[in-house]
Image (spheres, rainbow, N blue to C red):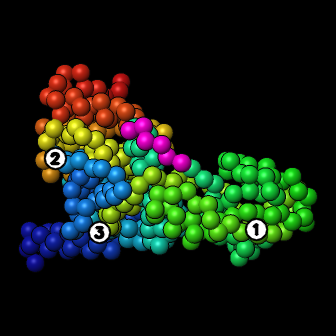
Amino acid sequence: MPRRTATLLASTLMLIALLCAGVLIPVPYSEMSPGPTVNTLGDHEGQPVLRISGRKTYPTNGHLNMTTVRVTGPDYSMNLLEAVYGWLDPDSAVVPHKTLYPEGQTAEQADQENAEEFSQSQESAKVAALKQLHIPVATQTVVASVLKGKPADGLLHAGDVIKAVDGTPVKAKDDVTKLVTRHEPGEKVVFTVIPAKSAAAAEKKGQRPESGRKDITVPTVKADGGRALVGIQAGVDHIFPFSIDVKLADVGGPSAGLMFALGIVDKLSPQSLTGGKFIAGTGTIDDQGKVGPIGGISMKTVGARAKGAQYFLTPKDNCASAAKDTPEGLTLVKVDTIGDAVQALKKISSGHTEGLPSCSISH
């Protein structure tokens, strides 16, 4: 066989071997890419994203889009060729698998965690929006969770409203621990509660649950440190003065909190927040309206600009990262609170954008 032909054949076989290896060899990486972006002021799959009833709402225009990142699942095994392709694609990011998923986490566990974070972000978005509008939001102490196999298991249930412990009214969730630990292990505690179903029915009507109280006696056991334990985690539930529903399927995590909150503020405000402009953004939000950082910021700015966004509300702690590779035509607006975001939107809607706080690269 001529040397040239032999060399060509060997090179071809080597290339085939490398391609096969690239397909067969798994690598410990996951891929992130721009995901869907949805207008919180509009409809998604035929339903309003935000539905408010029991309170006057106002027409809206423009866009307040929440943004997402599409990621490979926890059980997906990426091969070497896919990783290389992802590294070469400017609109995606290949990161270590453990960056997105803790070791040993299953797809079901990841979905559950994302769903819980999404639900909590909706709750905080409602609270932050109403506080921004100076609309009072009442709170109550509830059973957040019950530890399996502990004395309260089967007696108290998640969602039960705790009105009193041993006849002493409960005004804050920390009161529950203080009142229970007054007991010695083995003694019994009397909880005055309104069952979760009765509480939920009242909340749907925008009412504070008061009827259907029950006294439930729960024994205690000895916990670490010797204190008395019944096996519940107390939490805080909010009672909204009217109904606010968020409908958005196949989305998880907490990062849409800011945009949900702004959508609620816009629908409850006589003046349009957007002025017809296309504004997108991201960021977690807490009950006090504080905006927190998120992951995958560069993927979200790319996705937003591709859909036509002109401005992007960016959490302060994500600014430096986002500013490194800002899509052309997109203005990054730095926000730290919902109040910051509302003020920025007012400037954008009026066209007076000279003083907008912008993102810059840290040195």
Return the x and y of residue 81 as percentages of the image width and height: 26, 65
Q: Nearer the viewer, residue 261 or 243?
A: 243
**Is residue 216 shown above or below 131?**
below
The quadrant in which the N terminus is found is: bottom left
Left or right of residue 159, residue 326 in this image: left
Q: Which residues are magenta?
A: 133-138
Residue annotated with mark 1: 215
Q: Residue 2: x, y in percent?
A: 8, 74
Location of residue 189 by image quarter: bottom right
Q: Which mark is residue 328?
A: none
Find the residue positioned furthest to the front: 211
Residue 359 position by quadrant? top left
Q: Nearer the viewer, mark 1 or mark 3?
A: 1
Q: Please say whether residue 134 is one of the residues in the magenta stretch.
A: yes
As measured in the structure, the alpha-carbon distance from the residue carrying label 2 to the one carrying label 1 is 51 Å
Please tell me which residue lies in front, 350 or 99: 350
Q: Residue visible at 30% across and 30% down? A: 343
Identify the amino acid type marked 2: Asn
The mark lying in front, picked from 2 and 1, is 1
Q: Nearer the viewer, residue 21 or 201?
A: 201
Can you give x and y, in whole percent of width and height, for residue 85 in the image? Answer: 23, 59
Q: Find residue 61 and name its label.
A: 2
Three-letter code for the amino acid on which mark 3 is drawn = Gly
The secondary structure type at the circle numbered 3 is helix
